Each structure stands twice: as C-alpha cells, then as structure tokens.
Image (cartoon, rainbow, N blue to C red):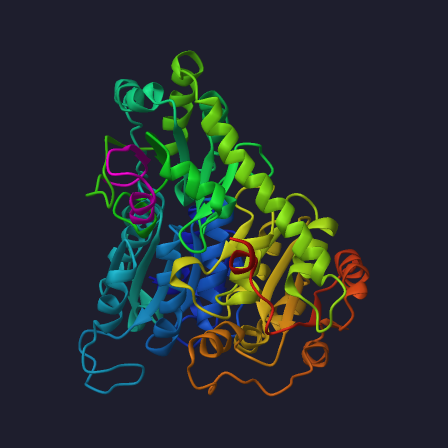
C-alpha cells in the first residue's frame, strides 16, 4: 500500500518534472509531500489561474509540459481560463486536479450535480480530458498525458484524480508504472519535396511562420529556409516573435492592424509557405483573406491534417524541425529566384513605416503624461536582444508591444494571445524567470490588468525572481475607453480609481518606482535591470495616445 499522492509525485518525477505550480488544498497535500521527497520544487501561486499560466509559459519556453495541480471544484474551474489559453497557444501542459468520487451526492463540497463536470468542462479546451477513479490507472493516465501534451500539435491535458484516492493509501501494482513513451514519425522526404514545387516555381513568394515553429524550437531551420528562398517573411499578428524582427527579410505582421509591408507582400504573392500554422485556424483564415484567390499555399504543420481555412496546394504534417531541415536541404539547391522588384517594393514599405515611426517618436518624446511609444523605444534601447517580454490583453501589453517593439529573438514574446485573458504577465514573468534566471524578463501590463494579478508579486518575492514589471498607469481600462470615446458609446465602466502602484508593490516586498517624466524612463529601466529583486515601474501614461498602427498605417 502507498499514498496515492506519492504515486502521482513519482510519475511526475519520472517524467523529469522539476517544478510544479499549485495552490494546495487538503486533497493535494500528499502530492506535495511526494514531490518534496523527490526534490521537485512546489511553487505556490496565489490563484489557480496563475498556476495554470505559469505551467503554460514553462511549456512554451522549454518544450516540456508545465504542470499545475489544483483541488476539485473551484480549483479546477479557476484554472480553466489558463488551460484554454494554453490550448490556443499550442503550449504543452498537464493540469492534475482532484475530482469528486463517482458516488458523491448532489451539491457536495466542491461539486455540482454531475461528478464528471470538470472532465466535461475541460474537454473542449484540452487535447485530452479524463478522470481516474481506479488507483491502478493513475500512472497510466499521467504518463499518457505527457505523451498527448507533446506529440503532434502540443497542448494541455486535464487529468482528474478521485479525491478519495488522493487522500488514502491505495494498492497500485509496480507494473502500472511501466510505460514506453511515444516517438513521432517524421514526414517522408518525398512529401516535402513534392509540396515545395509551387514555392520553388513562384517568383513572388512569402514565408508565413506561426507558433508551431516556436513550439518545435526550429528557428535555425526556419532561417535557413527563409534565406534559401530569399523572400519576405510575414508573421501572424499574435506571434510577431516567430521570426527575428531585425532580419532583413522580416516584413511585419497581419491579423489585426496589418503592417503595410506585410499586406503588400501577401497581396502580390503567387505562393506562400506556411509553417507551424494550423490549417483550420484563425491565422490560416487571415492568410486566405490577405492573398489572392489563385495563390498556392503550402502548409507544414505538426498536427493532424485539417480542412484549411484558405486554399491549400499541399499539406505536410509531422515534426516541424525535421520538415524544415529537409526543406532547407532541398531549397538550397532548387529554390529559384524571388522577383527583385517585388522584394524592393516590400522593403520600401518597411523603410517608409520605420521612418514615420521615428518621426512620430520625435513628436511625442517629451510629452507628459508619457506616451507609450516612448516606453517601447527606451525598453528596446536598454534591454538585451533576447529579453523575454510578457504581454497582457489590452493596449499596454498587446497593442503597444505588437505595434512598436522589435523582437530580435524568437519565442521571446509570451502573451495571452488569441484567448486574450487579462492578468497574464506577472505570473508568466515569474515562470519565465524560474525557467531562465539569468535572462531579462519584462512584464508589460496596464493598471487594470495589474489589479488582476498583483498578488503574484508575493510569489515573485518568495521565489526571488527579479523580473521587471512595467505598469502603464492611466486610471482607465484604456483600450475599451478609447473604443467608447471614438465610437460614440457612453464612457462608463472603464474608470479605475487612481492607484499608487509603486506603493502597492512595496507592500508585497517588491521594489516600486514611480515614473512621471519621460526623461526618467531610461534610468528607471537601468536600475530595474541591475536590481537583485522584482522591480515594478509605475509609469503614468497618456490614455489618449494614438496607436502606431492607427497613426501611420
């Protein structure tokens, strides 16, 4: 007989899990005991959504599933938003939750009338959702969860374990822990060669890399393909970091507030090589909308073949790193030539936009309240090339870093993405720092979003993570207020009482710095990056500042 919680911990440790994120309850303390005995770090989040965010970001940055653990009922449902977000980000993670026993009465503690309500709730937002009510199935379910989370298109998995199992000594045979993990079969070389024919023949072609390239950690192979094709590279709006932005081939993003160079590249293209974009996704639909009806689109993706949202000349599925490596080998010899006039026209648009952004920056550099474009410029000047930026829904963590920040390293923008929940950056930044303590991490967030996740400063202090949080403080839910203002809606429900964010941060044990003068942004950033503690910059901004994309594009 053994404690079932210890069995859960054993399987996690055998899958090389080094830390888990949780808000413990009496149903999960035995798991924590087992993790402690196996030297697996147990990181306390202050809300289960934040635990799920941390697991999501760990999965994005490492390629290994991040693990969050919750109690039944509200623990699971609190985490659901974070799990759904991981699903849209194709992030490998495993959520382990206590669930009610099958004979639980109606309206029981942590329950509703259906004892399987958590399994059903998570099913649409995961690659696999299951509940375990037999002790001997616990190791199998957890091992299978790791396989499912990482094979094909990565994503989250929900494993609910009967609370009575977790809180009792149970009999699990040793044979139940034996497991052979799945290994993926790469696509055939012939499939890659055949699919590339329309790309090789086209003189006006575009490379369109999405999040699948990031999850495959295939940047080097992607750059080889881009340089063999010598063509413009356009990224989906929510993944501007899918390709190095300082590479001469980068032509911007599409999906919302489209970059003019990206629009021109796609509108005039004869063929597009889409890599790491799910053919049935919003990003594929955007690609279809921005290209002509007779364009040839070739998809390389990791998941199962799906009906594409845009016309497809070919779809190749399988390991993206292997596919891109094979493609680079082929294209080095057979890529043909991209039309130089087409290339020049796209690059001219990129140059025009850069020059107009510089002029806009000069225009607003000294204004107070501070213009967010000045924050983006100073941050890019001071931060390392590979700084990790976490972003929130809304203007501060979404519109501004999308419009005006240059991502020189791939997989460096961790955002709530298309699910677009608020309160993401601080827990995300904590996870990023725990994954890579020596790398700079900056959390971009508005005062509204910060009030949803400021409790995770306590986690930052407890774990000694020295990220930098930039709060753009305008006493408003700014994106929605601007929408109300510009479209004639009543300006209600979007004011935030003036809040001293710096003082609030100090109360958690972090360091708070108030910035109201644009000349103080750079010194404050330099101080924050040099500090051996979490620093929050409370920057007072102009809520009426016009986005770069609206001002220029």
482 on left or right of 115: right
**How many marks are shown on the rendered structure?**
0
Is residue 39 among what the camera can see? no
The residues colored magenta run 285-304
* Residue 228 position in % (x across, y down): 47, 21
| Residue 140 on image: x %, y % | 28, 51
> Looking at the rendering, which quadrant does residue 329 occupy?
top left
Q: Is residue 237 magenta?
A: no
Question: In the figure, residue 206 lies in which quadrant?
Answer: top left
Which residue is at a point 19% across and 43% down the rendered structure image? 307
The x, y position of residue 276, in whole percent, is 37, 39
Query: On screen, 345 above or below 446?
Result: above
Q: Quadrant of residue 368?
A: bottom right
* Residue 354 vertical position relative to residue 336 in the rendered view, above or below: below
Does residue 487 show up? Answer: yes
Residue under the point 36% across and 55% down: 88
Residue that extends furthest to the top in the rendered view of this protein: 333
Q: Is residue 530 left or right of residue 144?
A: right
Q: Quadrant of the N terminus?
A: bottom left
- Residue 292 magenta-highlighted: yes
From this view, report whether residue 18 is shown above or below residue 82.
above
x, y (%) of residue 353? 58, 46
Q: Residue at x 28, y 65 (%)?
A: 122
Give 481 or 22, whichever is nearer the viewer: 481
Q: Is residue 403 found left or right of 9 in the rendered image?
A: right
Q: Is residue 320 above or below residue 30?
A: above
């Amino acid at each position: 007989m053994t404690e079932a919680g210890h069995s859960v911990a054993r399987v996690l440790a055998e899958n090389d899990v080094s830390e888990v994120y949780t808000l413990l309850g009496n149903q999960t303390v035995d798991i924590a005991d087992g993790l402690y005995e196996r030297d697996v770090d147990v990181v306390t989040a202050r809300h289960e959504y934040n635990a799920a965010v941390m697991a999501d970001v760990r999965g994005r940055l490492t390629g290994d599933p991040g693990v969050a653990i919750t109690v039944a009922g509200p623990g699971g449902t609190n985490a659901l938003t974070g799990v759904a977000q991981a699903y849209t980000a194709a992030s490998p993670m495993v959520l382990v939750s206590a669930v009610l026993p099958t004979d639980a009465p109606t309206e029981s503690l942590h329950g509703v009338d259906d004892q399987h309500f958590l399994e059903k709730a998570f099913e649409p937002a995961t690659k696999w959702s299951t509940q375990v009510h037999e002790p001997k199935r616990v190791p199998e379910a957890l091992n299978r969860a790791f396989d499912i989370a990482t094979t094909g298109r990565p994503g989250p998995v929900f494993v609910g374990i009967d609370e009575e199992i977790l809180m009792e000594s149970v009999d699990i045979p040793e044979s139940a822990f034996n497991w052979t993990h799945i290994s993926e079969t790469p696509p055939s070389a012939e499939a890659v060669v055949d699919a590339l024919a329309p790309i090789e023949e086209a003189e006006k072609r575009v490379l369109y890399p999405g999040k699948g390239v990031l999850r495959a950690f295939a940047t080097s192979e992607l750059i080889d393909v881009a340089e063999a094709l010598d063509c413009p590279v356009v990224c989906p709006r929510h993944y501007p970091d899918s390709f190095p932005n300082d590479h001469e081939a980068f032509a911007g993003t599409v999906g919302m507030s489209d970059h003019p160079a990206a629009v021109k590249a796609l509108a005039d293209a004869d063929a597009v090589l889409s890599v790491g974009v799910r053919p049935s996704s919003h990003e594929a639909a955007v690609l279809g909308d921005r290209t002509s009806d007779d364009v040839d689109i070739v998809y390389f993706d990791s998941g199962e073949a799906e009906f594409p949202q845009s016309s497809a000349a070919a779809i190749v599925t399988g390991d993206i790193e292997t596919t891109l490596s094979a493609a680079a080998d082929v294209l080095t010899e057979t890529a043909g030539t991209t039309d130089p006039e087409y290339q020049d026209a796209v690059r001219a648009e990129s140059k025009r936009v850069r020059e107009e952004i510089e002029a806009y920056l000069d225009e607003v550099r000294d204004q107070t309240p501070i213009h967010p474009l000045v924050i983006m410029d100073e941050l890019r000047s001071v931060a390392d090339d590979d700084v990790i930026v976490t972003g929130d829904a809304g203007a501060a963590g979404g519109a501004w870093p999308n419009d005006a920040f240059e991502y020189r390293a791939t997989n460096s923008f961790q955002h709530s993405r298309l699910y677009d929940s608020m309160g993401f950056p601080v827990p995300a930044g904590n996870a990023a720092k725990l994954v890579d303590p020596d790398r700079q991490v900056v959390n971009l967030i508005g005062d509204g979003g910060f009030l949803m996740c400021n409790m995770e400063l306590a986690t930052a202090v407890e774990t000694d993570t020295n990220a930098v949080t930039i709060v753009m403080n305008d006493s408003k839910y700014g994106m929605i207020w601007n929408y109300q203002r510009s479209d004639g809606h009543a300006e209600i429900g979007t004011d935030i009482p003036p809040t001293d964010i710096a003082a609030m941060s100090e109360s958690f044990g972090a360091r708070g710095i108030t910035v109201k003068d644009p000349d103080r942004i750079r010194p404050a950033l330099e101080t924050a990056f040099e500090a051996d503690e979490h620093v929050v910059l409370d920057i007072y901004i102009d809520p009426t500042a016009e986005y770069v994309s609206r001002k220029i594009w």
